[in-house]
Image (cartoon, grey):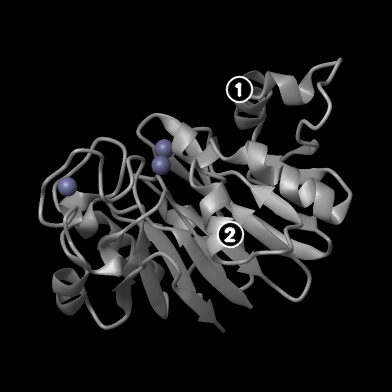
Amino acid sequence: MKVTFLGTGTSQGVPMIACNCSVCQSLDSRDKRLRSSVYIETDKLAMVVDTGPDFRQQMLREKITRLDAILFTHDHIDHTAGLDDVRAYNHLQKKAMEVYAEDYVLETLRREYSYVFAKKKYPGVPKIHLNEISTQAFKIQNQLIEPIRGMHFKLPVLGFKVDNFAYITDMNFISDEEIEKIKGIDILVINALRIEKHISHFNLEEALAVIDKAKVKQAYLTHISHMLGHYSDLSKRLPDHVSLAYDGLSLKF
Ligand SMILES: [Zn+2]
Ligand SMILES: [Zn+2]
Ligand SMILES: [Zn+2]
């Protein structure tokens, strides 16, 4: 299995437009964060979780030529804005893109991309096949995927467990029962926005607490804002089994 971090930044990305802080001005490439998304390859399937506004740039950077499916965690625009660019894969693979999301996310996609789902379609619009999922485990091409329920302030969001890997973003609450599902896995990716508490995202302390409870072998932090600090500083202060993710990082396991 291989996982590539396409983006590891919060909704505004890092650097943030017009910000002069030292993180946004950093010359370290690991402090430059596109909007959060991850590319997962198993022996059965190649998929991305979320297609934010940087989707095109991310797929070009990683030279990704195969994409079987897209999973959506929730319907915020920093996770959905890049969907139009699946056209490239429609042409390449000569079929519609399989998209998996909860009912309310599908409703948002139908509204935001009304031209894609219109009865009379303009030539060349993306071809997208929507698949509704819930918190029940499901299969894509024989690959088992287990949704993990969490809350993003008042919005229910999904994380996804694929074999020994789990990806969680945009949560600020996860129940002990859901943590049970990821207990002891090899790799957990989880969002950590900043040091200070936030209304809809785990801060660093809260993310570390979930990692502790889940007793995972290795954890990576994502959906990071410029307020979390410099990669080089913070990396030194994290426990051994926790790392900051950065754009372009890839893990084979
Ligand atoms: Zn987000
Ligand atoms: Zn900044
Ligand atoms: Zn969000």
- Residue 95 picture location, percent across and down: 87, 47
Q: Residues within 10 Å of mark 2 (few under 14, many from 20)?
A: few
Give the amino acid type for the residue marked by disc 2 in the picture: Leu
Residue at the disc numbered 1:
112
Quarter the N terminus occupies: bottom right
Q: Are marks 1 and 2 in contact (CB under 8 Å)?
A: no
Q: Quadrant of residue 118?
A: top right
Q: Is residue 215 visible?
A: no
Which numbered disc, 1 or 2, marks the residue that appears first in the sequence? 2
Whether 66 is drawn above or below 202: the answer is below
Residue at the disc numbered 2:
60
Name the residue located 57 percent from the left edge and 49 percent from the top edge: 56
Q: Is residue 130 visible?
A: yes
Q: Is mark 1 within 8 Å of ligand 3?
A: no
Q: Quadrant of residue 101?
A: top right
Find the distance from the CA under tag 1 to the CA under tag 2: 24 Å
Q: Nearer the viewer, residue 14 or 76?
A: 14
Q: Residues within 10 Å of mark 1 (few under 14, many from 20)?
A: some
Quarter the C terminus occupies: bottom right
Name the residue located 83 percent from the left edge and 64 percent from the top edge: 142
